[in-house]
Image (cartoon, grey):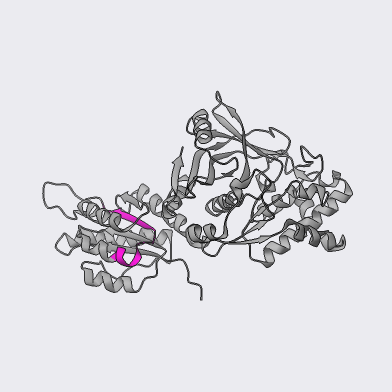
Amino acid sequence: MKKNFQAAYVPIGVGTFHMPSADDQFQKSIAMLRDICADIVVPEEKILNVEALSAYLESLDPDLIILQNLTFANAAYTSEIMHRFRNVPLLLWTLREPVIDGGRLRLNALTGAFSAANTIRQFKAEPFEFVYGSPEEQQVREKAEKMIRAAQVKYAMRSLKVCAIGHTPQGFGFGRALDNDMLETFGVRQDAIEARELIDRAKAYTDEECRSYLEDALQRTVGLNETPERNRLDFARLYKAYEEYVKANGIGAIASRCWPDFFTSFGTPVCAVLAMLNDLGVAAACEADMYGALSMWIGMRLSGKSAFFGDPVSLDEQANTITFWHCGTAACSLARKDTGAVIGEHCNRHIGPTMEFGCEESEHAVVFRIGRNPDGTFRFLIVEGKALDRPKQFFGTSTVIETKAEAEKIIANSVLEGWEPHYAVIYGDCADELEMLAHMFKAEVRRY
């Protein structure tokens, strides 16, 4: 039986400190955490000795530990936790001293944080997270919320199945993922199918069998009726083939080969099909970029919205912007409201349907990529900014991102560091969660 996600609150302390203050913070901490995550596991009482801690830990199977210094506690407490759960993501939360009046030190929790952290570093290879403050403080609540969201994404990845549809084109090997790497590093299972298998399925459908898919796309898009009839009907066939395969196999993200096969062997591009899947909540990257697809899926889980997938194609130093573009796979829901999800034809092959629009603005946007170092280890690129109100920049789909950091520096550093040419653009404020995820996966972080 599959277990549910479990976050566990572990408040440790010593009974010789000021228990009324500790009890007040204990109750307020539980109330705050339950408001964020209703089913968080909490102890019935404050944990004031190692024996009580050991008994509580026996009841846990956590996917996240929120370890709180309720008062000072020596390293024996943290050693017990690390011995059992060293690979579990951890947020170390240290309470602020409640009163400074020249009298008694009531909690001495901050000293406890140093004791705990020193022990954690002896056990854990990956970084942990830390927050200092009382449960009433906004930054404490925000840190706990973000940590829980990040841990929930990591947990969800254990049941995620992705699929490589065809191989990367020549020279695009940066997107190719090995099954074992995906499973060992991210807990993700990877399937594979040849593009021709889905093409053959699509060719076998009748027009009537695909009618509902065509009608669905007509509702989502603008101008699909202007696409030549053969391409319009063949698009509906591909849409049915992809959607049914994804649904039947429980797939959450795909990396699909696109050119040249769908032009030469089928006569109709797959671009708009991938856009439909992105609209349906299935992360769909083109050019068979599996790490791009996984980056999109993570962004979609954190933001609750479709993510854009594209290349950095233009830098404007004066405006401090980077334009991201691709041939036309953006989700219809990302289109500017004044144009809608316009249909066009592929910029190089002049065959449709593809998507043709500029993406809507967003006060918060994050450019994100799971990349690989030359030694095979993983790294996360995280760039904060906002998506501007800009029309389509080139044939295809595009979004213009004004970055918080200096755009010219981001581009120069990313090129010199050998980052890949595909990125997910996430419409939401989730940079902190992405950095937390990087820590959980022992991935290097490059954040701007």
Q: Residue furthest right?
A: 229
The reply, left or right, for residue 446 in relation to residue 427 is left
> Residue 145 lies in magenta, yes or no?
no
Q: Which residues are magenta?
A: 81-95
Residue 10 appears at what percent x and percent y?
31, 64
- Residue found at the very far left of the displayed protein: 103
Q: Residue at x 39, y 50 (%)?
A: 143
Q: Residue at x 62, y 39 (%)?
A: 311
Q: Position of residue 400 (x, y in %)?
A: 61, 34
**Who is closer to the viewer here, 98 or 128?**
128
State how many labels appear. Answer: 0
For the view shown, which residue lies furthest in the top direction? Answer: 318
Q: Is residue 159 visible?
A: yes
Residue 214 shows up from this direction: no
* Residue at the extreme bottom of the image, as rendered: 1
Q: Is residue 41 above or below residue 28?
A: below
Q: Is residue 91 magenta?
A: yes
Is the residue 196 above or below the residue 403 in the image?
Answer: below
Q: Is residue 250 above or below residue 442?
A: below
In the image shown, does 42 or 86 lie closer to the viewer?
86
Q: Which percent across, then down, holds residue 235?
A: 80, 52
Is 411 above or below relative to 72? above
Q: Is residue 390 rendered to the left or right of residue 51?
A: right
Q: Position of residue 71 (x, y in %)?
A: 21, 58
Residue for point 76% across, 59% down: 198
Left or right of residue 129: residue 325: right
